Image (cartoon, helix red, strand yellow):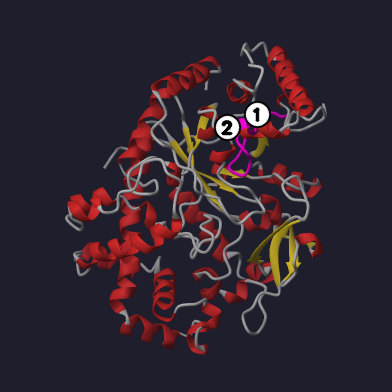
Amino acid sequence: MCALIKIKTMKETRKAGVLCHISSLPGEYGIGSLGKEAFRLAKNLAASGVKIWQILPLVQTGYGDSPYQSVSYNSGNPYFIDLEFLMKEKLLTKEEVKGAQRKRGERIDYADLYETRYPLLRRAFSRFNFDGEIFRSWVKQGKYEDYALFMTAKTVFGGAFFEWEEPLKRHDPEALERLRTAYHEEYLFWHFLQFQFHRQWQNLKNYCNAHGIAILGDLPLYVAYDSADVWAHPTLFKLDETLRPTKVAGVPPDYFSENGQLWGNPVYDWAVHEGEGFRWWKKRLSDALSTYDYVRIDHFRGLDRYYEIPYGAETAREGAWQEGPKEKLFEGLEGQERIIAEDLGTIDGGVLALLHKLGFPGMKVLLFAFDGNEENWHLPQNFGENCVVYTGTHDNDTVMGYVDSLTAEEYFLFRSRIAAELERQKIFVKLGPHGECLPEALAHIALASRARIAVVPMQDILELGSEDRMNSPGTSEGNWQFRLQKQPSARAFRRLKKMIKIYRR
């Protein structure tokens, strides 16, 4: 096992980061994994001076393939399990692994993965000694009990949990015992997947830490309705007597969508959470802080006030704001100095006051900055050190994609404002007439800023266009499929290293 470095708090040093999810890594098996390409990227990032590798949630995805809609908040995605590692463990043959190969660099085909990857992982499980002491201890700890039972029930009975027979639907202990006993090998299979995932994840994280890289992970505010989380803890959510949601989550109309976003996740019954001392939520936060070195809480504003929409509404326009738990959620929580707040969207004085009380760094996004408003708080001159600045996030278009979407007039204004910012900071980047070097210019501006952490998405480092965007909020197709065709070139890493050195990150 690699030696671990001490992860410094947010306030100790200036750092540069790169955003690239595990699924986006190159490779031969249809989706990025925790295998050799992940280690290779970590090595190249470390050599370039990068101190933060930011990823999206590692969870097992459900319908829609979004890492923000999982079957269980603490699960690991079985698709990320490295098949070559299983081959070295003699759980798969060389021929079986070869059969999983797909053309490198193609967009992720989740339907193909669903049809082919699980049968292959079941074959590996059939050769695994599930009576071994280490694995049995893993099962007995109970961390993945609800997940394993949930996935066993879905495999055996199909459908969503609220469609199951009443005792199982209600998470009745006797029904759970019958399920566990009657389908014990299926139950152990889902434990096996988490066992393999977390072994491989810990190996990668240890390698990153030993090479001076901290992992910045992502914690979605909400969980999916058809999940082990809601099934096992229905009283923590606003559900009716049939376990159907009464209210669901989303956001009002904003920059991303004129009708707002109707996410459909059940919202929390915060009064019940508070009555239990926020036990479930604090465990969730603690699990995230033990999985990652830093944790970004997605949609942080929902902890001050959250937007709930009547179940069955057609758009998010019909919603209303409600009070959230605020700072009470974090009382007594260890590791708070490693939390980042995603404070984008509709931000008001309440969110700003909560951030100030907790001291969490917020986010700044340069693609939002250059609209001509000198008071824009995404402009570098308007923010201080306690934040994380991005050229764009996984929900934005890439810089080149954004530039290509502009009219001639909009492009002229955007380019001229970038040029003025470069001149103000005395940064020399020669901008081309058609958007060339604008991604590099925004990377310079981010790294030069006062923000303690500056993160550049891999797509902007490589100056990729809209076809390589990760997610388009408010849409349900074509997302989460981006993959690198190959590792970034030595030239790209040299350019990144030079920028990091110039700005002393």
Q: Which amino acid does label 2 sit on?
A: Lys
Compared across the picture, whether 127 is left or right of 371 comes to left
Residue 309 or residue 7, whichever sits in front:
309
Instruction: Examine the residues drawn in magenta and state their main secondary structure.
Output: loop
Can residue 98 be found in the magenta stretch?
Answer: no
Residue 288 visible in rendering: yes
Membership of 391 in magenta stretch: yes
Above or below: residue 291 compared with residue 437? below
Pointer 1 residue: 385
| CA neighbours of label 1 inside 10 A, class few (<14), some (14 to 19), many (20+) | some
Q: Which residue is denoted by mark 2 in the rendering?
A: 11
Mark 2 or mark 1, whichever is nearer to me: 1
Q: Distance between the residues labelled 2 and 1?
A: 9 Å
Q: Residue 233, relative to residue 504: is it above or below?
A: below
Q: Do the residues labelled 2 and 1 touch (CB within 8 Å)?
A: yes
Query: Where is 403 relative to 316, above or below?
Result: above
- Range covered by the magenta-colored residues: 383-400
